[in-house]
Image (cartoon, grey):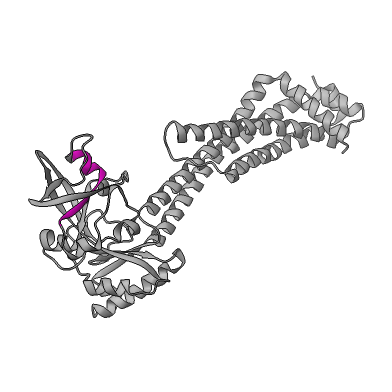
Amino acid sequence: MKLQMIIENARMSARSIAGNAVRSGLTGLGVMIGVAAVIALVALGNGAQKAVEANLQALGANLLIVYSGEPRGTALVRTNTANIRPTLTATDLEMIQALPADLVLAAAPASTATGQLKFENRNVSATVTGTTSAYPDIRNYVPVHGTFFTEVDLESRARVVAIGMQVYRDLFPAGMDPLGQTIRINGISFRVTAVMEEKGSLAQDNSVLIPVTTFQRSISGASGYQLINIQAASAEVMNQVQATIEQELLRLHRLPSMEVADFYIANQMDLLATVQGVAGTFTILLGSIAAISLVVGGIGIMNIMLVSVTERTREIGVRMALGARGRDIMFQFLTEAVILSVGGGAVGVAIGLGTTWFAREVARTAAVATLESVLLAFGFSVFTGLFFGGYPAWRASRLNPIEALRYE
């Protein structure tokens, strides 16, 4: 088909659409809503996935956690570890720390208990965690004011403490520098050396960190660890590290298999894969629901085009009498359907991207629009015009010229 004929068909289609502006606008509305819904809902699904992934990464890079006790699902972080009986020992920690640097970069034990904190006339309840100087790097949880305790503090069982941001707000007057101040934890005096960064997590912000040796002597009275945090050398070796540690801990604990193990290893990559799978399914579900609107919009296009064919039967007959072929008639009506769907799709893309921006910048909701989702939604709108406009166009091309001229 010549370019001149294509241009002329487009002009005729545009005039026909403009002549029924309200009806054409309502017809394209279904496609517009469908495209906007697909882009916005997929963006929300992608945003939720990215937010969860970011939260997991905030816990630490390439993180594995060995927990004392029997396996309790695949959760990377247990909200209640204070009641876990410590089964991990200093020997277990030394074994993990002795693994090659191409497998393990660092390891830090941790044990927790609920403590009552007091400064002057203020009292708060917080989680007290005993750990080592490697903890901030492994768990990506660093001081924003002051310095974390050192190996010297560990060896000397120093009574020093790094406090979470929420503890700082609750325990000290606004604007007061807490460094060097003495607080009491369960009646025992500790000197504040650091304020930790705010994580937005109550479990971390409402906690304090002290040397694990001090924790064992002054808080728990137990020599074991409730858990051991491990930073693997890379994501690729995490499964290998997990298998190696499981094997070595079974040997050290003289246990035959993981079925009777008194420890459990949570793998960040396993949890991440699960989250990605669930989020991906959720995103597809949202996109599929929104795509129904596109199908409904396509049915609307077919309905209007069938009405248009009926209304313009005499016009079709005149064109055929003047030499227009069936394929010319079909192409004209197909062009109208595509213009309606493309126009609605373009407006829908703008609305979808605008909604995504509003959700992210104004409503502060995680939303990430991708080029793939935009192209998919717009491409589907074009396909909708071709598919649902095809039958009315074919029907118009099959009209008998003589009967079309007689049509009233």
Q: Percent from the top left, x then y, of residue 113?
A: 16, 55
Q: In this image, 348 relative to 164: left or right?
A: right
Looking at the image, which is closer to me, 151 or 205?
A: 151
Answer with the quarter of the image where residue 373 lies.
top right
**In front of the other: 373 or 82:** 82
Residue 227, above or below 324: below
Q: Residue at x 51, y 35 (%)?
A: 356
Q: Is residue 402 visible?
A: no
Quadrant of the image containing the C terminus:
top right
Is 169 situated above or below 209?
above
Residue sitting at x 33%, y 74%: 98
Q: Quadrant of residue 219?
A: bottom left
Q: Position of residue 271 (x, y in %)?
A: 39, 58
Q: Quadrant of the N terminus?
A: top right
In the depicted view, which residue is nearer to us: 48 or 32?
48
User: Among all residues in the image, which is located at the extreme left?
Assistant: 187
Please name the residue shown 33% across and 61% down the image.
74
Q: Magenta residues?
A: 159-170
Tally the numbered discs.
0
The answer to whether residue 36 is seen in the rendering is: yes
Q: Is residue 321 left or right of residue 33?
A: right
Q: Is residue 120 magenta?
A: no
Measured as percent of width and height from the top left, residue 68 is found at 23, 66
Q: Is residue 211 left or right of residue 121?
A: right
Q: Is residue 164 magenta?
A: yes
Residue 117 is situated, as x and y percent measured from the top left of the image, at 13, 46
